Image: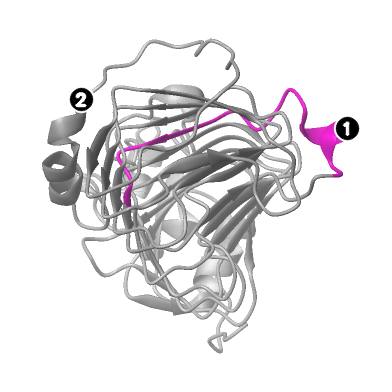
Amino acid sequence: MRRTSARFKLVSAVAVTTAVAALGGVTAAQSAAAGTAAAPLAAGTPTGFGAGTTGGAGGSTVTVDSADEFIDAAESDGPLQIRVTGTIELDDMADVTSDKTIVGVGTSGVIDGSGLNISRADNVIVQNLTFRDSDDDGINVQYSTNVWIDHNDFTNPNDGALDIKRASTDITVSWNHAYDVDKNMLLGHSDSNASEDVGKLHVSYHHNWFDGTTQRNPRVRFGDPVHVYNNYYDNVSSYGVASTEDAGVLIEGNYFEGTDDPYHLGEASSDEGSIVARNNHFVDSGSGEAGGSVASIPYSYSLDPASSVKSIVTAGAGVGHV
């Protein structure tokens, strides 16, 4: 990985103060000195399957602007809130451990050259970052639970923008903007991984802008239910959603524009799953292929009218809109 000459050491809430920016007028060090934790860094709260995610809330807050600092913070033990300012240039996927919040500052936070690997972790928030030109995935999530991926931009990854796999579950993917992406969002990596994935891969995708992406918005294996609602599909060139290998996907309240194949059953050599589709809005698009049954969504949620989703999502998705 491209690294600076000095490595960033996390030792205690007080020692880390030189890297901490003011948050609501109070630094993490001042909070620690007063015996209280820093205020939560992430804006808003997740809904859907990832609703229980709190990230690094309760931990100190640090500001990083180099690969060294970012990697050491993301890999550290214990809860931590990480503010990213400027471009972090990575040569390899950076590991993210449990109880982390990673948030870009303003519109300046960029992860360039490679991406994030959230593996065997619990309770992670990634918000308001641009992921560009990764040599692998923008974000890879595997063997992880309670993850919230929110208000990020994804562009030009070598592989997937956001892949979720290997028994990961209880995840919300919300208000992201993906553009110049072929293999966008994969859910479940292999037809042969049923032993790990059945009963897992519960993910909510809502208010995302799939902006001229090609495919996998998402492509789903095994997860049932998976909830795809209030997303804007904008001239998606190959297909929107594919449900395969006994997956169950509820597709509702989405806006499909210029998308010939909004959703279908099966994909390539993968067997069919199930799709229940309702209350979607179509403009210059196909009608989609649905069939089978999907398990009940186990949480309450508010659904925007499908006809309003384009304006809502384009005004609010991506970096700078938290």
Name the image quarter holding the N terminus: bottom right
From this view, report whether residue 33 is shown above or below residue 140: above
What mark, if any, has residue 195 been given in the picture? 1
Q: Secondary structure at mark 2?
A: loop
Q: Which residue is mark 2?
A: 304
Residue 119 on image: x %, y %: 70, 50
From this view, report whether residue 257 is shown above or below residue 183: above
From this view, report whether residue 34 is shown above or below residue 259: above
Would you say 75 lies left or right of 70 here?
right
Question: Residue 91 appears in which quarter of the rendering?
Answer: bottom right
Would you say 55 lies left or right of 306 here?
right
Q: Amino acid at mark 2?
A: Asp
At label 2, counting other C-alpha atoms closer than 10 Å, the crowd grade (few under 14, some 14-19, many 20 or more) is some
- Residue occupying image coordinates x 71% and y 32%: 222
What mark, if any, has residue 3 been given in the picture? none
At label 1, counting other C-alpha atoms closer than 10 Å, the crowd grade (few under 14, some 14-19, many 20 or more) is few
Would you say 256 lies left or right of 101 here?
left
Range drawn in magenta = 192-209
- Residue occupying image coordinates x 56% and y 24%: 291
Taking depth in this image into account, of 158 and 129 the one nearest to the observer is 158
Taking depth in this image into account, of 70 and 118 the one nearest to the observer is 118
